[in-house]
Amino acid sequence: MELSGMFNYEFVQRAFLAGMLIAVICSILGVFLVLRRFSLIGDGLAHVTFGSVAVVILLGVSPAYITLAALPLVTLSSLAILKLTRSRLIQSDAAIGIVSSAGIATGIVMASLSNGYNVDLFSYLFGNILTVTRTELLLSLIVFIIVAAMVIIFYDDLFAVTFDEELARTMGVKTNRINLILFILTAVAAVLAMKVAGIMLVSAMLILPPLIALQLSLNFKMTIIAAVLFSILSVVCGIIFAFLLNLPAGGTIVIFNIAFLLLVIGAKKILPLQR
Amino acid sequence: MNIISVDNLTFCYNGMEVISDISFAVKKGEYLGIAGPNGSGKSTLIKNILGILQPQKGSVNVFGQSLISFNQWNRIGYLPQRISALNNHFPCTAKEIILLGMTKKNTTALKRILERMGIAHLSARLIGELSHGEQQRVMLARALISQPDLLIFDEPTTALDPETRDIFYSITDEMNRVNGTTIVLVTHDTGVIGKYARNLLYLDKKVIFSGTFEDFCSSPDVTGFFGLDSQHIICHQHDKTEAGI
């Protein structure tokens, strides 16, 4: 199949649009999460998404609404991680570990109750951007608008909280509110990224683009922009290659992300950036 | 007018009292030094005053307002202790940090503070590329840029070389004497406290001493607690400053 021909299909157009929107959402949120040492939250929430999808499938929800139906549980789990971390009783990595284990355990039990692992559940494990529904595209657009608005309106507050949460509090930043918004949006992003990369690779969508951007030694604003650009580039290249070579899109997108990361690290070593 | 009022403040970590039943007030234009041994609760007290930690008992009022409803944070400049915990991979420039928290990005104020702190040449550099001393100067510039009415410093000069340390203290001293800025300084450096602060709060989980240097130097109770040598170092430095030596 030729490159130009693939865009004639509506499902490919939907995949590109949703993929790019989700890429922007994940990379923006990822910058804040990585810098605040919450990199593994994507993994944790992906595992919860697995449990939530298993519950939703067991309840017989129509496949078109599975993403939406999985959202409440994943959002609650994200807030549970935040609450556990804030309690100072458990460190953030351990809190993610607890919620992650609970998600996987729930998924396994629910899959067993629905007479073993079925095809639907496996399709969510590995994702398929080419099966994005109109509802999911609309949800991606809404979340994209919310994330973009959040960054524009609360840029200073987000920057301050990411730099030093205690210092931000002494500047009058409502840190609890910022954390709440960030963790809710991360939960939604994790559920959406499940469609692009699959549950197994959700965290890659959140972590890799910010890591590539961080290698470039830019200021804060430019780091966010660079992460967004690399994320979009990986999604576009990933979908094209997956479609032309009949490869799984999720894995291909993540491989492109890793390739860009290695490329930037290599270029940095060979050609030290002049500031 | 009291800029800070702390009443019967008690704070516990995991059920253990770190500071116990502390009360004191800081008046407008005062330069208060807070001293005490490691683990005496100095930083915990500062974090309670700034609302970072919430006390189990007691209350804090800042600028006559309870911390619960306090919203004039732009009147406070805070320089935290733990510059060493700064993430050196954090992607931001010195300029971005100095302007952090300023609702209106005032370029004139930025230029003035950069020159005053001797870091104009560092403004576009990433924070991770700077030495600890330079990073601390950037953080200090951030605390000073909006010319706050109250400055709170927690071990501010730990990473600074002697020259920068002198610049730091001369700037803050000038802000206190000329502009009437209220200053609360937490430090281990008893010589510095004696030289610049006019009042002293000595903590060891509770208030051991609170008052002026004259009271501190003439009190036999203080001699009994500190020992003659420590008391002399602080008082001698204070006397030299008062005499303009």
Image (cartoon, helix red, strand yellow):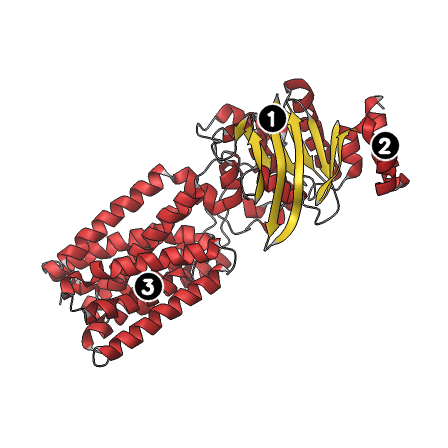
The x, y position of residue A191, in whole percent, is 28, 60
Pinpoint the chain carrying mark 1. Answer: B
Figure disc tally: 3
Residue position marked by numbered label 2 in the rendering? B219
In this rendering, is residue A120 above or below A238? below
Q: Is residue A15 left or right of residue B21?
A: left
The x, y position of residue B170, in whole percent, is 71, 27
- Callout 3 amino acid: Val
Q: Gap between marks 3 and 2, in whole Å?
A: 66 Å
**Outermost residue, top direction?**
B178
Are there few (<14), some (14-19), or many (20+) residues within 10 Å of tag 2? few
Mark 1 element type: strand
Q: Gap between marks 3 and 1, in whole Å?
A: 50 Å
Residue A202 tag number: 3
Residue B144 tag number: none
Q: Gap between marks 1 and 2, in whole Å?
A: 27 Å
- Callout 1 amino acid: Ile
Residue position marked by numbered label 1 in the rendering? B3
